[in-house]
Amino acid sequence: MQHDQPVRSRRTAWDSGLRWTALLILGAVVLVGPVYFAAEIERIANLAVESAQTSPLLVAGAIILALALDIFLPVPNGVTNTLAGAIFGFALGSVVIWVGLMVASLLGYTVGVLAARPLALKLLGEQELIRAHRFTTGMGPLVLIFSRPVPVFAELATIASGMAGMRLGQFVIITGLANLSVAMVFAAIGSAALADQSGLLAITGSVFLPLIAWLGFRRWHAKQNS
């Protein structure tokens, strides 16, 4: 039995490494995708701007839906958020982005609450599940706040909050305020990019800002676990 312990430890470390590698690859796809598909994204953005003049509610609904689906699909939030700011301006763009981010956050929380323990064990592993149950103590709220603009980790944080049993009221307050900050930043960048016809500002909002947030969160998270 004693010989089995090192094997299990190595297997756990290997499984954890594979999961983190998959998350890193997924994050890279979300960040690099807007650059690789820049021409297609520009075409869709121009179509959305034109459509918003005649059907603003339809375009707003599509943006909210795209942000909500980010909990399940690798949607480039930076592009979607910046586009919302460019189409609707700072004030209304902030509202549209915030609603989409809140829907995604609540979906993630619900998934975490409803996830059966066997499924959670299969997807996360025992060690990660234990960490999730410790999520509501210590750095839990801070992780929720700091992960809001971070691709992939933002969604994982909401799911972990539901799994860990964080109170819904506390979750809504934390994510509501944090998502509002994110929404205002991206709406400001998007509206300024359209007003100045600045491609640099648009790229900053859609690619560089999420990248900086992702790298910063990874560094902060590593320090907390060291």
Image (cartoon, rainbow, N blue to C red):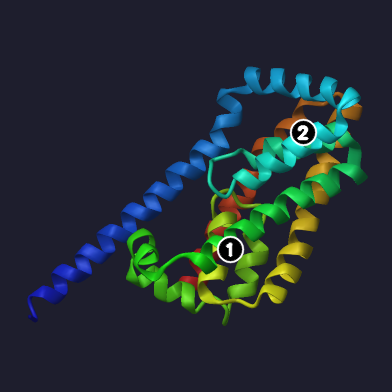
Query: Left or right: 206 with respect to 86?
Result: left
Residue 103 position within the rendered picture, expressed as x and y whole percent measured from the top left: 69, 54
Query: Left or right: 110 with respect to 87?
Result: left
- SS for callout 1: helix
Which quadrant of the figure contains the N terminus? bottom left
Q: State the separation of the CA atoms marked 1 and 2.
A: 27 Å
Q: Quadrant of residue 86?
A: top right
Contact, mark 1 vs mark 2 (Cβ under 8 Å): no
Q: Quadrant of residue 11?
A: bottom left
- SS for callout 2: helix
Residue 169 seen by the camera: yes
Residue 205 seen by the camera: no
> Residue 83's mark?
2
> Residue 34's mark?
none
Q: Quadrant of residue 170?
A: bottom right
Which quadrant of the figure contains the C terminus? bottom left
Residue 122 position within the rendered picture, expressed as x and y whole percent measured from the top left: 33, 61
Q: Nearer the viewer, mark 1 or mark 2?
A: 1
Disc 1 residue type (three-letter): Thr
The residue at 72%/75% (across/down) is: 169
| Residue indicated by mark 1 | 110
The residue at 91%/29% (across/down) is: 195
Query: Left or right: 20 with respect to 220?
Result: left
Disc 2 residue type (three-letter): Leu
